[in-house]
Image (tube, rainbow, N blue to C red):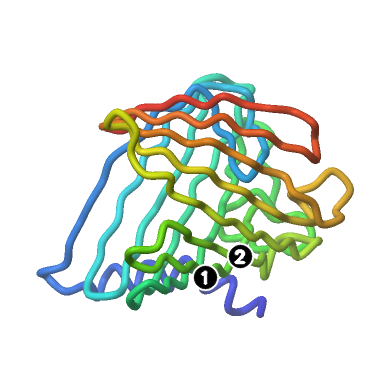
Amino acid sequence: MKRLLFASPLFFALTLATVPADAGVGFGADVVNRYVWRGTDFGNAVSVQPGMSISSGNIEVGAWSSWAISGGGANENDLYVSFSSGPVGITLTDYYFPTQDFDEVKTDDAFFSYSDEDGVHWLEISASLAPDGVPLSALVAYNVSGDADDSFWAEATYDLGEMEETAVSVTAGFGNGAYTTDADPALVSVGLNMSKGDYFASYILNPDRETTFLVFGRSF
């Protein structure tokens, strides 16, 4: 497993190098008042979240990141490769959390360090299901490296349709380990989501931490 993890950046690079000339490409960014992911607020700061991807057939390779505009926020810079077939998707994601202070860089903060003990990567495998014509979609994910708790995540989203040209949905997320206050399985995210054009917002309740968030953002 360790050899596979050290090879993952090289795997992404080789994948990009072999993409056909007619592949699709995309890039963009979101700006959000704060970065809330799976019931947790990362840094309590406005964040810029750029992304880019290259796709060919059923395969997509991409990068996504979140950069806080203040020093107190959390930074993240991920790589992923996904495969889709009809309503089913499989994704391998390398979550990377770079240091914010270069004066405090340790050996295990380096990008090529995949230490299970004190590295700065999580490697996650996830599967999603989103059948056409069905308002319900689901995702399950498992951390296979970098997370001492081997955390599991399950999420379901129900599409309520459009109201006054605004898409509305509800989401519920259940996790354990790193996602909860005591590592025990718990419901940690219940959200009401709205989007219209380039704008989106979510009201999120974390029953486990007994707190709420209101996230607003714009896509570019």
Residue at image position (25%, 66%) is: 55
- Find the distance from the CA under tag 2 to the CA under tag 1: 6 Å
Q: Name the outermost residue toward the top.
A: 70
Q: On the rendered image, what quadrant is the C terminus found in? A: top left
User: Viewed as shown, does residue 19 lie left or right of 152?
Assistant: left
Residue at image position (58%, 78%) is: 4
Q: Quadrant of residue 139?
A: bottom right
Residue at image position (80%, 61%) is: 148
According to the image, label 1 marks what residue?
127
Decide: few, some or many residues near mark 1? Use Cα within 10 Å; few <14, some 14-19, many ≥20: some
**Image height check: is 55 above or below 45?**
below
Earlier residue among tags 2 and 1: 1
Residue at image position (36%, 34%) is: 195
The one of 99 and 177 positioned closer to us in this rendering: 177
User: Viewed as shown, does residue 164 lie left or right of 207?
Assistant: left
Label 2–label 1 contact, CB within 8 A = yes
Q: Secondary structure at mark 2?
A: strand
According to the image, label 2 marks what residue?
141
The one of 182 and 92 positioned closer to us in this rendering: 182
Q: How many marks?
A: 2
Q: Position of residue 107 (x, y in %)?
A: 69, 51
**Image height check: is 13 above or below 211?**
below
Q: Position of residue 198 (x, y in %)?
A: 28, 31
**Image height check: is 28 above or below 95?**
above
Q: Amino acid at mark 2?
A: Ala
User: Viewed as shown, does residue 87 lie left or right of 188?
Assistant: left
The one of 214 and 114 positioned closer to us in this rendering: 214
Q: Position of residue 8 (x, y in %)?
A: 50, 70
